[in-house]
Amino acid sequence: MKKSSRISFIFFILIFSLISVFPLNNFGNRFTLQSTNSHEKIKNSSVINDRYLLERVESFLNYGGVSHFYTEGFATDSEGNYYVGGSFLGDYFLVKYATNGTQLWNRTVNRYSIDYGVVVAIDSDDNIYFTGWSYPGTQSWNVGYVHTFKYNTSGDLLWERVLSSDDSSPTDIAFDSSNNIYICGHTYDFGALGLDFLVVKYDPSGNLIWVNNTGLNGEDRGYAIIFNPVDQMIYSTGISNGRSVLFKWSTDGDLIFYKIWGRENGIGWRLAYVPFLGNIYIVGPRLGFAVVIFDMDGNNFLNISGQDQYVIHITQNNELFMAMQIIENGYYNTVLSKYYLNGTKIWENKIQTPSIDYSQIFAKDINDNIFLLTSNLNLLKYTVDYIPPIINFISPLPYESFGKIRPDFQVITDDFNLETTWYSLSNNTFMTDNYIWSGKIHQNVWEQFGNGNITINIYANDFNGNHGFNNITVIKDLSIKLYWNLTGSTIFIDDLDIDFNWYKIDQENPWCYGLGTQENPYVIENILLDGMGIDNCIEIRNSNKYFIIKNSTILNAGLEYDSVALLFVNVSNGLIINNTMSLSYKGIGLSSSDFIHMENNTLNYNMYGFYGSYSENLTISQNLIHDNSLSGISINNCDNNTINLNYLNNNQGGISLASSHKNLIRNNIIFNNFDGIHLSYSNNNTIKNNTLNFNDEGIFLYRSDNNSLEENVIKFNKYGIKINSRFSIRNIVKGNVISHNTELGLYIYGKYYHSHDNLIFNNTFMSNLENALDEVLNNSWDNAVIGNFWDDYNGKDINDNGIGDSAYNIGTGVDNFPLWWDPPVLSIVSEKNNLIFGFLTPEFRIMVEEGIADTIWYTCNNGISNYTIYANELINPIVWENLGNGSFIFNFYVNDSRGDEGNIEVVILKDIILPSISLKSPNSSQVFGHSPPDYDIIINESNIGKIWYSLNNNENITIETTNGRIDYAQWDLLPDGEVIIRFYANDSAGNIGFSEVLVIKSTQNNNIPGYHLWILLSLFCTVSFLLSSIILRNRFEQ
């Protein structure tokens, strides 16, 4: 079982070798690149930004005229030459090409019955190494040889080495800084009956340094190997028993570590390292990510989301290139992408291929050209685009003269990657501003100049930053009258009347010229025709000649019934461009006419802007149609017409169809009309990508069947879509945005005639007064898979499958599969708003109340850094440490697999400032006896918690106020002497501040209150008595 794929392939090669005949004298020709079928294979090639352009697609499928050709090897050297290696008719082959694709030499080697070349690699000295495996054909199927060849740039074989091992296959080559060669792959282990990883080292002289066979879990296969110059180590990857493996080896062959990782059956297919950093980037099938990233210690620290990539390359400038294949709309696409190292995509390029065509090899040469070799042997080359756009003037001629009317220009700009074209006008003294080039000069720009030479400067740039320029000089002469004033006249052409046919009109009138052919049509241009309210201004009948009417003003045919500014009856092959038709009953009128193209015209202030009947294959495109009293565009009994990119404003009706079928109405902007689009008795029409705003009814259907209303934006109308019940059936309404309509988003109404079997799904209904109402039975509001999005849906989507778990009712209808996706709902269990913390990092516990979480992260104070978390985690300690004192907003986010986000906000106060305590009393060294001191303190802290004090570090005594008296009992317990009173206060964050004072307790001779005072009074009285006695005695003696 382990050998089935190898055996089948070898058996196929053997059979092919027996039946194939390939003369030896064709040896030289068989290596000629065959690219004749390559353009048939590649359906679409596109240009990519960042100065890269797909230059050449070559196919090796029919190499040398023989279809059985296989290659997996490709490399480029320092001179831009490239090498292709593989297997051709069971032999090794190697081909060298110059940068332009010219074959320089080829080498074919036959060693055994089957030789299969796998890898081509170039060392820093431009030596070419080519390795593959050989099957002898005479021994067990489990016997195979790894052949390695070394060539110089001239194609000389320098040495060949054979590693004889059981069923060995090489898959990749790497070189270290000394150009030692490392080959990885796998080999058969008879003891374990499975494959082992194989790594082989040769020195540049071809000496075998070491071989390492490593078996992990049964079936082990090596796929890729690199040398990482950052740590001078070897890294290889592969698959072991259905899981990806990353190895790290020393250059001496010692296994440093291996990491088994990833999804089951995921394959680490290719890998690359980041210069100067050494991180390892791995891509491959079924990894679950576009890129899996390890550091040099084997830690998977980052993954880049996206689809499976098959090749990867990181340049010395840290440019990350990857390639993959995807399927879009039934087509296979080979996709080349460029990323920043953090996973941000810069650009991508898609190339359609008719079948699966996986990218296998990526290479970049010295000229920064990119090569992709795919599994179907297509070689895609992307070159750096330095070619500026080329601008050529078709008309006018140099120094051609023009009058008041601006000249018409035909300019061809040749650049596949063209971005913008613009122009300016100049003469010797003045240059205008730059204007976007739309195929003609603006009249107001032309009018800035008087008579004389005027230079028209045309500029162009492409998406790759290249700029092109060309100019031409013409002469402005205001004496030339190029605007023909035909006021009061009419133009009548009837090709069935020789007196009024095109040829006659051309011969007799200077304002008409041409031959009436597709290459040289008749042209009527630059005329002003005012019908003076008398008759049709221009009338053309019974003609199939090619003609153009352009740059003219045609008006005032009159508002009487069927007075037409521009009328066609039984006419075909006309182009009506850049004209103004006004003040007539019909601006443009057609009957029984086909293949008329009307573009960039202004139709205003008529009864009907455009009116057509019994006509087909009309194109009405990019016209400005406004302020017409009855209808902007009205067609009756007209089929297979296109109404595209028109701007209709302030008409009674925007676009009206009556008994008209299979018409396409798309990309129009229609607002401020009564009906935006009105269909009656009209079937199988497509109404797509229109914008319908501020109309009374956005779209109205009356007795119209099988119409498709797709992807329209319908806003700010009274009714978004209105379907009359008179048998409008089997219409499809899908993909529309229907919002902000003041009555109903979609209304199917009527009770007597049923509009049934209409299908309404995948629409967005939001901000309407009422989203929808169905008064008729048997319409479907879902397609049995998906319904519509309703902004007032009050159900849930518990299983996150994008479908609401309960139905949505619409009158008599019901949407069984409403589109709904609940963003995940977060709650924080262990934290609440306005909590206060100090130096310790807050802990929180996140719960996802609703939905299925994909990733949970948070930001602080709307910072740009996101921090991914899991439940019961601390806030990142470094983040918390770097925050200062104050209030901080932490926003916690969660997303689901669709990217819908839920969030919750938590306000946390970080308080790292200790409470400050000031002592007003007692004073330092103040003496107290039996009575304890009074205290008065001031605490500076807004988030005060608790206040307490201690005496000589004894028991803490909690107090409620900042003033009072020290506790008597605690004071009495103290001996006389010094007493330290220490006051404490903490805040809500747990910060503690204190302040202390030293007082003296002295209770000696202080048992009787007032004792010292009585002693002093007694002494005073005794002294006074003695003094008084002495004084009296002295007086008496005298």
Image (cartoon, rainbow, N blue to C red):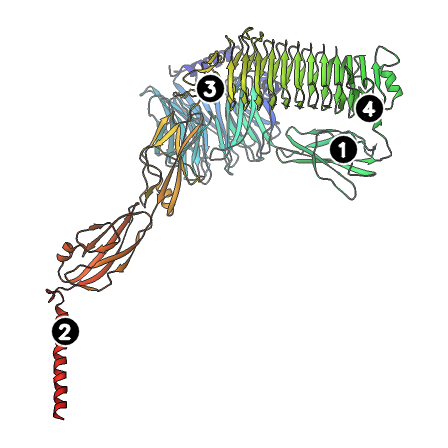
Q: Which residue is mark 3?
A: 819
Report if the CB atoms under discs 3 and 4 are less than 8 Å apart: no
Front tag of 4 and 2: 2
Instruction: Judge the density around disc 2: few (<14), some (14-19), many (≥20) Cα neighbours within 10 Å.
Output: few
Q: Which residue is mark 1?
A: 443
Residue 419 figure quarter? top right
Q: Is residue 86 visible?
A: yes
Q: Which residue is mark 4?
A: 529
Residue 610 figure quarter? top right
Q: Earlier in the sequence, mark 3 or mark 2?
A: 3
Q: Position of residue 648 (x, y in %)?
A: 66, 23
Q: Which residue is mark 2?
A: 1017
Front tag of 3 and 4: 4
Kindly identify which numbered label has been placed on residue 363: none
Count of numbered labels shown in the rendering: 4
Q: Name the kind of residue labelled 1 in the image.
A: Gln
Q: Position of residue 40 (x, y in %)?
A: 61, 17
Give the camera-side residue of 505 and 680: 680
Report if the CB atoms under discs 1 and 2 are less than 8 Å apart: no
Disc 4/disc 1 C-alpha distance (Å): 19 Å
Q: Position of residue 113 (x, y in %)?
A: 47, 17
Report if the CB atoms under discs 4 and 2 are less than 8 Å apart: no
Instruction: Judge the density around disc 4: few (<14), some (14-19), many (≥20) Cα neighbours within 10 Å.
Output: many
Q: Earlier in the sequence, mark 4 or mark 1?
A: 1
Q: Earlier in the sequence, mark 1 or mark 2?
A: 1
Q: Position of residue 389 (x, y in %)?
A: 68, 32
Q: Quadrant of the C terminus?
A: bottom left
Residue 468 in the figure: left or right of residue 802 = right
Instruction: Judge the density around disc 3: few (<14), some (14-19), many (≥20) Cα neighbours within 10 Å.
Output: many
